[in-house]
Every structure is written in structure tokens, then in C-alpha cells.
Image: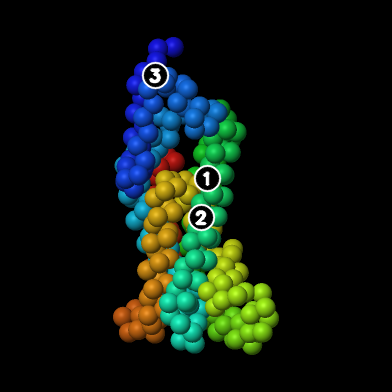
Amino acid sequence: MMASYFPIQNPCFKYFGFLDFRFNNVSSRSCNSLLMPGYSWRRFESKYDGWCETFFLMAFLLIFFSELGDKTFFIAALLAARNSPVVTFFGTFGALAVMTIISAVIGRTFHYVDGILPFRLGGTELPIDDIAAVILLLYFGVSTLLDASRDGVKAEEQEAELAVSELSGNGAEISAAATSAVISTFVLVFVAEWGDKSFFSTIALAAASSPLGVIAGSLAGHGVATLLAVLGGSLLGTFLSEKVIAYIGGTLFLLFAVVTLAEIVK
């Protein structure tokens, strides 16, 4: 096979401006093997070409609006009222950042397994990772809209108050297990966020789209939402009601499900 000068210039890498690999005298086949056996670089590149910025925005909007009315948002607001806002922000955002990376890794693992062991139906290869992403996004979209119509957002606030009161009531135990308020906040938010809708929505987006764009967009969404909670979640209510925020979040879930489904069909 003829060797060639092969520049890897994936738009997602260029978007962050820190990766620009170049291989001299490397065949395209051997370059593909640098990714994963049986996984084509051209497939990777064509799948994400021009989509990194798009999925950054999608992840940002989805996480931002889903977190505004979420239990984690109220936990951060309540903790900031009782403790240092700086400590609360770093503890909360640190937990959400770790959760985002875990979700993205799970999503990409699911995607790679699907690439190695494709699911076929009647001779047609089905992108099972993308289909699962559509199902998850549809589920959370419908459930979020139903919660908004049934005042389910009030339950999130009540759960947050209960979690914070338990943290305050068991201060001695928390101090024995954690050496600082940052770690205490980190543990509380991490446990509260595990298995939440933003956790699974990040898995869904990472499985079906650009991992770097999803991680960056999710972190930005978590960061802005946490900052709003720490600075004063009650101020948000003067501009948007909890019900309106929930409706926006549910609509975004459904919208991105349609976008992902359109990519499957295309």
C-alpha cells in the first residue's frame, strides 16, 4: 500500500485548538488502526464534520435548562445560603464535572461497542447507540413536560431541602469522612446527581455525537447553572417560573431527539 502524508484535522479537535496530529509516511489503513480496530477514521471524521460546535450548543442548552429546575440546583442554592458561596460552587461544579466525564465515557464506550459489533436487522446495519440516544431523549422530554404540568418541580425543591437538612444534621459524621466543606458538598451533589436525567442525557448525547463538544457544552451548562444557583436561585424566579423552565427543558429534550433521529435517517 502506498504510504502518504496524512494530516488529521478533525474539526472538533481544531475547535479546541490543542490537537493537530500529523503522521509522516503513514498509510491511511495504519492511521485508522490508531483509533480502534475496525473503526474507520473517515467514518469518524465524516460523522463529526461541522458538528462539534453544534453539539456544544445542544449540550449546553440541554444541561442548562434541565439543571435550572433540578434538585442539584436547589441544593447548591440552599448550601450557598448556609455556607461560603465559593466553597459551594467548587464543590458542586466539581461533582458535576466528574459526573459529566463519567457519563461521556459510558456513552462513548457504548458507541465504540456498537461500531465493533454492529447490530443488523434484515441486512441493514442499525446504529443502536443513536437509537438508544433518541429513546432516552424522548423519555426525559416527555417526563419533564409531564412533571411541569403536574407541578413535579416542587418535589425537586422539597428533596433538595431534605438533602441539605440531612447534611446539616449529620455534621459530625460528614466531618469525620470529609476534611473540608468542599468535599462534603462534592459528595452530597455527586450522590444526588447520580442517575439523574442530566446524567443519562449526557450519556445519550456522547453516544450519538461529538464527545468533546458534548463534554465542553455540558460543563459550560453546569457551570452557568451552578453559578446562578450560588449567586441567588431565588432571583431567577423573578424572570422565569419553575414551570416555564421545565417546559423549556422538556421541549429541548424532544427537539434534540428529533435532530438525532434525523441524523440516523440521513
Residue sitting nearer the eye, 254 or 110: 110
Work out which quarter of the rendered image holds the C terminus and state it: top left
Identify the residue at horizontal 35%, vertical 44% (top origin): 18
Res. 167 image quadrant:
bottom right
Identify the residue at horizontal 57%, vertical 44% (top origin): 110
* Dot label at residue 108: 1
* Dot label at residue 25: 3
Q: Is residue 17 visible?
A: yes
* Dot label at residue 101: 2
x%, y% of residue 42? 41, 29
SS at mark 1 in the image: helix
Label 3: how many Cα within 10 Å (few below 14, some 14–19, many 20+): few
Inspect the image, locate mark 1, and give the three-letter code of the amino acid beneath it: Arg
Residue sitting nearer the eye, 45 or 260: 45
Inspect the image, locate mark 2, and give the three-letter code of the amino acid beneath it: Ile
Residue sitting nearer the eye, 24 or 220: 24
Considering only order in the chain, which callout, 1 or 3, is on the residue closer to the N terminus? 3
Residue 74 sits above or below residue 24 on the image: below
Inspect the image, locate mark 3, and give the three-letter code of the amino acid beneath it: Asn
x%, y% of residue 107? 53, 49
Q: Are marks 3 and 1 in contact (CB under 8 Å)?
A: no
